[in-house]
Structures are given as structure tokens and as C-alpha cells.
Amino acid sequence: MKMENAQKLEEVKQAMKKAKDRRMYERYQALYLYLQGTRAEAIAPILNRSVQTVKGYIQAYQTGGLSALKMNHSPGAPVRLTK
């Protein structure tokens, strides 16, 4: 189990190095801290995100791996102006 966790940590560390987008880097950073044993409640203030957001990153990783963290759309409220 410990060896498997070390492998996951290394995988996340490599992804952090390759990340060009600040948001993706932040998500990898949250995972890295989590895999080191830091609780989501402690990670949230470090990243200036809500606990719910950090737990969402962790849950996405646990269900789909690193690829599940990639954004397919821009988060935020929908545009209110009509075309």
C-alpha cells in the first residue's frame, strides 16, 4: 500500500511539473497534499478554495484518475446576454 501511494505521489508531482494552466496546477497540488495525508479541511485554506471544491477534486481523482481533473468547460455562471 505504501509503495502504491509513493507511485501516486510521483505521478501527481510529474503532472504538476507539466501543468501549464494555473487551475490544473492547483488541482494537482490539492491531490498532492491529500496523498501526503493532509485533510481536505486543511487543504482548502491553503488553496483559497472551499472544502467542498477540494473534496470534489479528490473524488474526481478517486473515480477517474488524473484525467478526471481536466476541465471540459469553463466553470462559472452562464452568460446572460443573448446573441
Image (cartoon, rainbow, N blue to C red):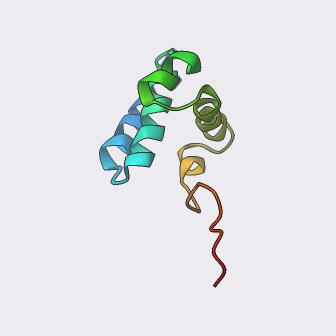
Q: Residue furthest front?
A: 81
Side (left or right) of 18 relative to 9: left
Position of 63 relative to 44 (above/below) = below
Where residue 7 appears, x then y in whole percent? 45, 29
Give the percent coordinates (x, y) of residue 18: 32, 49
Closer to the camera in the image, 54 or 3: 54
**In this rendering, position of residue 39 left or right of residue 64:** left
Residue 39 in view in this figure: no
Q: Can you say whether 45 is above or below 20 in the image?
A: above
Q: Where residue 60 sits: x, y (%)?
A: 64, 41
Q: Residue furthest bottom?
A: 83
Near-viewer residue (74 or 76): 76
Residue at position x 37%, y 53% from top?
21
Res 71 quadrant in image = bottom right
Image quadrant where one finds the C terminus: bottom right
Tell me: 27 left or right of 57. left
**Which corner quadrant holds the N terminus?**
top right
Q: Do we see residue 32 in this rendering?
A: yes
Question: Which residue sits at x=48%, y=39%?
Answer: 27
State the residue in front, 80 or 40. Answer: 80
Residue drawn at (69%, 40%) of the image = 63
Q: Residue 20: percent from the left, percent from the top?
A: 33, 54
Q: Quadrant of residue 58?
A: top right
The answer to whether 42 is drawn above or below residue 23 in the figure is: above
